[in-house]
Image (cartoon, rainbow, N blue to C red):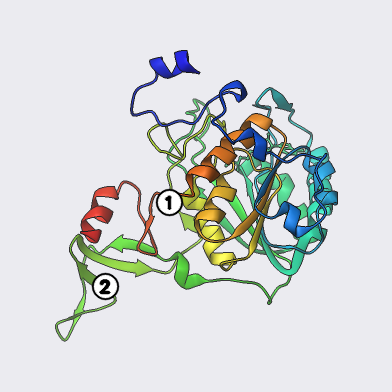
Amino acid sequence: MDGDKMTKSARNKTIDFDLAHAPAGVLAQIKTAADDLTTMEKVKDQSINGDSFAILPQLPDRVADLALVDPPYNLNKQYDGLHFKRLTDNDYQAYTQRWIDAIKPKLKPNASLYVFADWQTSIALAPVLGKNFIIKNRITWQREKGRGAKTNWKNGMEDIWFLTMNSKDYTFNVDQVKQRRQVVAPYRENGQAKDWQETRAGRFRDTMPSNFWDDISIPYWSMPENTGHPTQKPEKLLAKTILACSNPGDLVLDPFAGAGSSLVTAKKLGRHFIGIEQSKLYVAWGIYRLMRANDDRSIQGYTDGVFWGRNTGALQRANRK
Ligand SMILES: C[S@@+](CC[C@H](N)C(=O)[O-])C[C@H]1O[C@@H](n2cnc3c(N)ncnc32)[C@H](O)[C@@H]1O
């Protein structure tokens, strides 16, 4: 890592240590199938290294208020040397049903889930989700990054499926996920601002959140949350799901936890978590992030209890002065 570090720009904050250079205290915190995982006391706020299909059955039942499920998309992909090989649609559906069967007993009857996919994977995924859960919404995350294509439209979006166990009994804290937007044409009624506020940083309106999310960037090298994981989700994105569909003290379960983004975000927002990830390296990166969250609970793009648009850091700082 040291040699690598020397070639890295000083502003590059990417977490990419190897296991031999893990910061003190990280490796000792990793749980595995060899540990007792059968009670909440043992598994609460833990990151478990192992195969979710083997680990989930060991966990206590009906404990999770929210599951954040970011499985391998149906693409050829390498995760720390472990290959996910593209499957036929039928086989991907069978794979999806397998993880659903493993996770469902772990959810409370009023739990919610978010499941992530690209548009192609979604075609196979959606019918299986619909058979097992109530589909409440399909969120489009507009990503600004994507590989250009010469014979097709470049992919600039991801699907996020919002699902519940029960059609009526579920948590949705709409007031906690409002989006702060700059007001272009500030409307006044009898000289008074209508639904907007004058602040030090300008005129803003806190708007109701929709199912089109265009305010979230993919983590990149100058962001402290960035790791070497190939498909890491932004904390800001996960914060929306956690704030909307859980309450402080609730439990968030992530069976494909990667570099721990959902676990870190849950911790920053005062929720408990259980994460499972097959790569020990990714688990280690996640635990390091969890340790750093002891001192830094900030989530980039989420300040003053609202979500700000992309590239508004200066406005957010001005607003707080
Ligand atoms: C799409 S990534 C999730 C990324 C994660 N949301 C983040 O922000 O870092 C999927 C992850 O699932 C892991 N994975 C795949 N199959 C698994 C299994 N059977 N059990 C546990 N983890 C698995 C992969 O190693 C990969 O890190």
Indicate the secondary structure of the residue bearing disc 2. Answer: loop
Instruction: Single out the mark in the foreground, 1 or 2.
Output: 1
Disc 1 to disc 2, C-alpha distance: 24 Å
- Determine the image quadrant of residue 89: top right
Percent across and percent down for residue 142 are 47, 47
Name the residue carrying label 1: 299
Estimate the x, y position of residue 291 in percent, counting from the top left: 53, 43
Q: Position of residue 248 (x, y in %)?
A: 56, 67
Mark 1 is surrounded, within 10 Å at the Cα level, by few (under 14), some (14 to 19) or many (20 or more) other residues, namely many
Q: Nearer the viewer, residue 207 or 303?
A: 303
Q: Can residue 131 be seen by looking at this rendering?
A: no
Left or right, 170 with reference to 293: right
Task: Give the amino acid type for the residue marked by disc 2 in the picture.
Answer: Trp
Judge whether 37 appears above or below 111 on screen.
above
Label 1 secondary element: loop
Q: Image point 85% across, 50% down: which residue?
A: 57
x and y percentages locating residue 103 in the rendered image: 78, 54
Q: Going from the N terminus, do you reach mark 1 or mark 2 first?
A: 2
170 vs 57, left or right, is: left
Q: Residues within 10 Å of mark 2 (few under 14, many from 20)?
A: some
**Residue that badge 2 annotates:** 196
Specify whether 250 is left or right of 53.
Answer: left
Q: Quadrant of ligand 1?
A: top right
Amino acid found under the numbered disc labelled 1: Ile
Classify 239 as above or below 152. Answer: below
